[in-house]
Image (cartoon, rainbow, N blue to C red):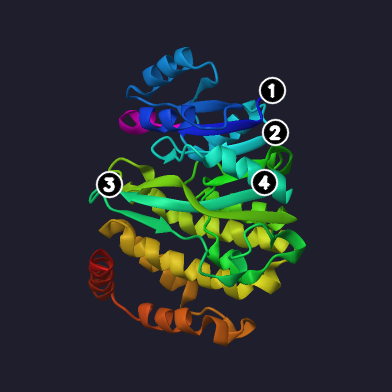
Amino acid sequence: MPEISIIVPVYNTEKYLSFCLDSLILQTFKDFEVICVNDGSTDNSEKILENYSKFDDRIKYINIDSKSAGGARNEGVRQAKGKYISFVDSDDFISPLALENLHGNILKADCDFIFCNVLCMFEDTGKHKIWNLGTQNGNFQNALNIKGGKAAVKDIYACITSIVCARLYKYDFIKDIHFEEGTIFEDIPYSAECFLKAQKIAFDKNPYYVYRIGRNNSVMNQRNEKYKDIFKMREKQEELFKKYNKYEEFKEVLLTIKMEEFLTRAISAKTEISLEMFEIIKEKFRDFDYSVFNLEKIEKIKNLYDKIIKMSDKEFLIYADKVKKAGQNG
């Protein structure tokens, strides 16, 4: 039985898939299996998977037709035999030391899952940037002492992204946690439940995971109709906090994260979808009751929304264009 199962959802990533699989084969930690879940690819991805499975018997692949990363990951976990689970997207790759160090630290910490920093690689410019998942927050400086679950800390949750990769989980911890299927942003409720359920979480500040940004045919870069799934997934997140009786404690953090991401996604979407999302934002927040929140903690985002919901469609598009240009220059 392998110590670690690596789940790789695959959909039309022939350009990057070999690089991803090579990064797994070259791990200094050898006791693992790779379960590639080919979700209806129409390019040469399946042929690449077939060749790699012949080359290295630790690499297995299955074909499904769920049309979602969530469905592919769920199937991968169902097939997994490892004591620990890691997710790697097929257009990304990991450091040769990733499994060895994360596995060593999860054993040392005896935690439910461990996460690390991410190195962002921008496809259009070739530039790299470390995505520090909270390392500037003092709570992260003591790397193996982050508590989750009942001892969950609000500012830690505000720092942790919803990315499900760049983590190593105990299989027994996540076996009953499932991804939403048929949607994007499925990692949001999944990550929320992992955080809420965990009794102990560990952190390694090294950027073992390399995340490609700006891939032209990626789902997240198409900015299409499914971009509106963000509204549904953030609502699912809040439902989970209520289920675990943590909503009242975290409600200002959750509201801020939700409002910031609604606006960010609306700004980055294609024009037609952007305006549809703008209308949803106005509908949700025009008569929103802020009185049940600590206004000091949400003042900045509330003030911004007070301005946003008064804009016309034209004014919003001008504002969105300015924000995008500022981001490109910054």
**Location of mark 4 (residue):** 106
Label 3 Cα neighbours within 10 Å, binned few <14 / some 14-19 / many ≥20: few
Q: Secondary structure at mark 4?
A: helix
Quick check: can you spot residue 240?
yes
Distance, label 3 to label 4, CA atoms, is: 32 Å
Image quadrant in which the N terminus is located: top right
Distance, label 2 to label 3, CA atoms, is: 34 Å
Mark nearest the camera among 1 and 3 is 1
The answer to whether the residue labelled 1 contacts the one labelled 4, judged by CB atoms less than 8 Å apart, is: no
**Location of mark 3 (residue):** 123
The answer to whether the residue labelled 2 contacts the one labelled 1, judged by CB atoms less than 8 Å apart, is: yes
Mark nearest the camera among 3 and 4 is 4
- Residue 1 - label: 1
> In this view of the protein, which residue sits in the foreground, 24 or 10?
24
Q: Earlier in the sequence, mark 1 or mark 3?
A: 1
In the rendered view, tell whether residue 195 sits above or below residue 186.
below
**Location of mark 2 (residue):** 83
